[in-house]
Amino acid sequence: MTQEERWLARYNEVMEFMAANHRNPSRHRIEDHDMLNWIKVNRKKMNAGELKPERVSLFKQLLALSEMYKRKNQYQ
């Protein structure tokens, strides 16, 4: 399995999780930690400009979905 295949497998795993559970991976649930850490590492790489260009567009789609499930302040 190449590095690109592993990245896509992890990407698909996170996307399926978010679509099925209608929430982001939680830092409080042990079973979600791998997905959360993967998102955090790739967000840091993207902000630093180290993420491959073909991965940036896919990752931005994931971040858009993540933003949709983000907790919002009910008083604003």
Image: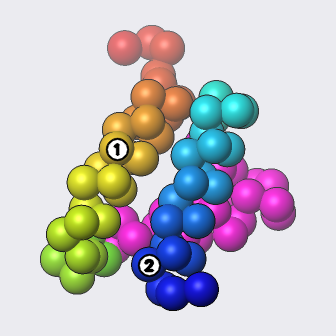
Q: Residue drawn 17% across and 77% down?
A: 49
Amino acid, disc 2: Glu
| Mark 2, residue position | 4
Name the residue at 46% across, 40% down.
66
In percent of the image, x 64 and y 55: which residue is there?
Answer: 13
Q: Amino acid at mark 1?
A: Gln
Position of the C terminus, as image quadrant, is: top left
The answer to whether residue 47 of the structure is visible from this angle is no
Q: Give the mark, 1 or 2, whose residue is nearer the N terminus.
A: 2
Toward the viewer: 74 or 60? 60
Compared to 3, does 73 lie above or below? above
Quadrant (top left/top right/bottom left/bottom right) for the N terminus: bottom right
Q: Residue furthest top?
A: 75
Magenta residues span 24-44
x, y (%) of residue 65? 43, 36
Nearer the camera: disc 1 or disc 2? 2
Residue 64 spot, x, y in % from top left: 35, 38
Q: Is 30 within the magenta?
A: yes
Q: Crowding at label 2, few (<14), some or many (≥20) Cα neighbours within 10 Å?
A: few
Give me the residue at 24% from left, 76% from top: 52
Disc 1 versus disc 2: distance between alpha carbons? 17 Å
Q: Residue furthest front?
A: 1
Q: Nearer the viewer, residue 51 or 12?
A: 12
Label 1 neighbour load within 10 Å: few <14, some 14-19, many 20+: few
Q: Which mark is residue 61?
A: 1
Label 2's element? helix
Task: Identify which residue, 28 or 2, lies in the foreground.
Answer: 2
**Relative to 10, does residue 18 appear above or below in the rendering?**
above
The image quarter containing residue 19 is top right
